[in-house]
Every structure is written in structure tokens, then in C-alpha cells.
Amino acid sequence: MFTIIVLVALGFGLLCCCASFCIFCKYRPKPVNAIDDENLIGDRVHDPVAAQRIMEQQNKQKLTLIGKQLPRKKYSNTAYKENQESCAICVEEFLPATMIRETPCKHIFHDHCVMKWVETKLTAPDCPFCRAEISINAR
Ligand SMILES: [Zn+2]
Ligand SMILES: [Zn+2]
């Protein structure tokens, strides 16, 4: 007789647990939508970061390659007296001993000016002055 009472009590208790668990599941404060959104945001954060890192790496390599095509020199007005006394990008005159870069088409620009320019045109770099293509492959 005692065992039956215990079993019934246990059964009742189990039923109560199940019921309250079901109710808890159904009415818990966090709606299912919120969880989905969280997962979505999580994916959005994780993947693009990795993708962006890879792209930044590739861009850096490209920029290095482009930089190799643009030899860095010190400006001296005897070497470039033709028509190039100022930088076509910032329109400032070259000062003696300023660091410049020369494009394959023989145009010269401030080092930082031309590097900033090609950084925005990594897929198809060109000369800011005559728009001649700057090949990424070694000469
Ligand atoms: Zn400049
Ligand atoms: Zn040029």
C-alpha cells in the first residue's frame, strides 16, 4: 500500500514537472524570434570579419606590388624639370628632397599622395595625371 502511494506521489510530481516545464517553454520571456535574430547577428559578425581580414591582407599585398612599380625617390628639380614642378593630386609644389614616386609613364607625385590614390583603385590602378594603367606585374 505504501509503495502505491509513493508511486502516485512520484507520478504526480513528474506530471507537475512536465507541465511546468511545458508552460515554461511556451511562455518564457525570450521569444523565439529574439533567439533567431541573435544567431543572425552572430553570423553577420563572425563571417564578415574573417572575410574583411582576408580582403585587407590581399589589398595590402596589392598595394605593395603597386608600390614596387612606383619607385620612391627624392625630388630634385633638375631631374624632373619638364613640366612637373607640382603634384597633380594635391597641386602643391615639390620641395627639394621631398619623397616622391614615379609612375611607369614618368609622372611624379608625392609619395603619400600617389599611394593614397592607388589605394582607392587597387583593382585597376592608373596614373592620376594621364590615366595610364599601372601594371601590378613586375616589369
Ligand atoms: Zn601631393
Ligand atoms: Zn602618367
Image (cartoon, helix red, strand yellow):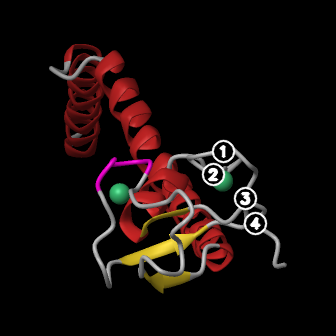
* Mark 4 or mark 1, whichever is nearer to me: 1
Q: Is residue 109 above or below residue 130?
A: below
What stretch of residues is rendered in magenta? 88-92
Image quarter in which the N terminus is found: top left
* Lower sequence index among marks 4 and 2: 2
Residue 85, located in which quarter of the rendered image?
Answer: bottom left
Ligand 2 lies under 8 Å from the Cβ of mark 2: yes
How crowded pointer 2 is (Cα within 10 Å; few <14, some 14-19, many 20+) is rated as many
Residue 136's disc number: 4
Q: Kindly report the distance in space between the C-alpha atoms of the residues bearing marks 4 and 2.
A: 13 Å
Q: Are marks 2 and 1 in contact (CB under 8 Å)?
A: yes
The residue under label 2 is: 127
Residue extending farthest left = 29
Q: Element type at marker 2?
A: loop
Ligand 2 lies under 8 Å from the Cβ of mark 4: no
Q: Position of residue 56 (x, y in %)?
A: 51, 61
Tell me which residue sits at (33%, 48%) in the image: 90
Q: Are marks 3 and 2 in contact (CB under 8 Å)?
A: yes
Residues 132 and 65: in front is 132
